[in-house]
């Protein structure tokens, strides 16, 4: 099993845990309606993302190239490039669908609660990380790893 395959599995798991935690905090009527007044939940969500990015940094430092060893082969590079390309398209579609859905829902009210803009921003990070890792895992499995 390639170290990048292991990294993809670990990264997927890390961001999936962050996503589930984020959704459990955010998708609460109180959080959405009182976003600016709820410091505790805002800090909790920011802390979740700190955990996600810190975890990525730790994984990266643990898996960095050793001197004189081959870090990536052509298969790893190909899988990484393809997963990033696919996830870019999926992420663009996600942003379009979510923003248009929020707009359509709140169109008659003529305003969108600011919490939804924060949701789009935070969830974009989650979707990009989860989808890229998930597609990498699929591509590694297809290649026989």
Image: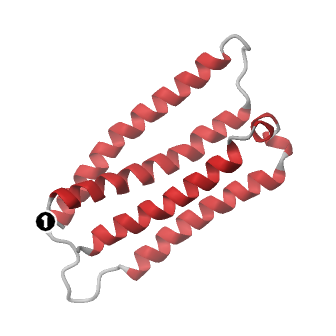
Q: In the image, is residue 101 above or below residue 138? A: above
Q: In the image, is residue 134 above or below residue 97? A: below
What is the image's colouring? Answer: secondary structure
Question: Looking at the image, which residue is at 46% across and 63% down?
Answer: 13
Label total for image: 1
Question: Looking at the image, which residue is at 72% across and 14% down?
Answer: 110
In the rendered image, which residue does mark 1 sit on? 74
- Residue at the limit of the structure toward the right, as seen here: 37
At which x and y percent is residue 36?
81, 42
Q: As drawn, is 37 to the left or to the right of 72?
A: right
Q: As drawn, is 48 to the left or to the right of 140?
A: right
Q: Quadrant of residue 79?
A: bottom left
Question: Looking at the image, which residue is at 42% across and 60% down?
Answer: 12
Q: Residues within 10 Å of mark 1 (few under 14, many from 20)?
A: few
- Residue at the limit of the structure toward the top, as seen here: 108
At which x and y percent is residue 122?
59, 47
At which x and y percent is residue 19?
56, 52
Q: Which quadrant would the N terminus be assigned to in this image?
A: bottom left
Question: Which type of secondary structure does the marked residue at label 1 adopt?
Answer: helix
Q: Quadrant of residue 107?
A: top right
Question: Looking at the image, which residue is at 36% across and 70% down?
Answer: 7
Q: As drawn, is 87 to the left or to the right of 79?
A: right
At which x and y percent is residue 4?
29, 69
Q: As drawn, is 134 to the left or to the right of 46?
A: left
């Amino acid at each position: 099993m390639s170290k990048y395959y292991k990294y993809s599995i670990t990264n997927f798991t890390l961001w999936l845990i962050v996503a589930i935690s984020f959704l459990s905090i955010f998708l609460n009527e109180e959080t959405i309606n009182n976003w600016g007044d709820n410091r505790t939940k805002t800090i909790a969500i920011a802390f979740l993302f700190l955990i996600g990015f810190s975890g990525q940094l730790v994984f990266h430092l643990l898996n960095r190239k050793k001197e004189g060893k081959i870090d990536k082969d052509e298969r790893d590079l190909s899988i990484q490039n393809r997963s990033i390309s696919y996830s870019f398209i999926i992420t663009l579609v996600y942003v379009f669908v979510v923003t248009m859905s929020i707009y359509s829902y709140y169109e008659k009210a003529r305003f969108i609660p600011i919490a939804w803009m924060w949701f789009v921003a935070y969830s974009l990070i989650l979707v990009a990380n989860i989808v890229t890792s998930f597609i990498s895992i699929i591509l590694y499995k297809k290649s026989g790893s």
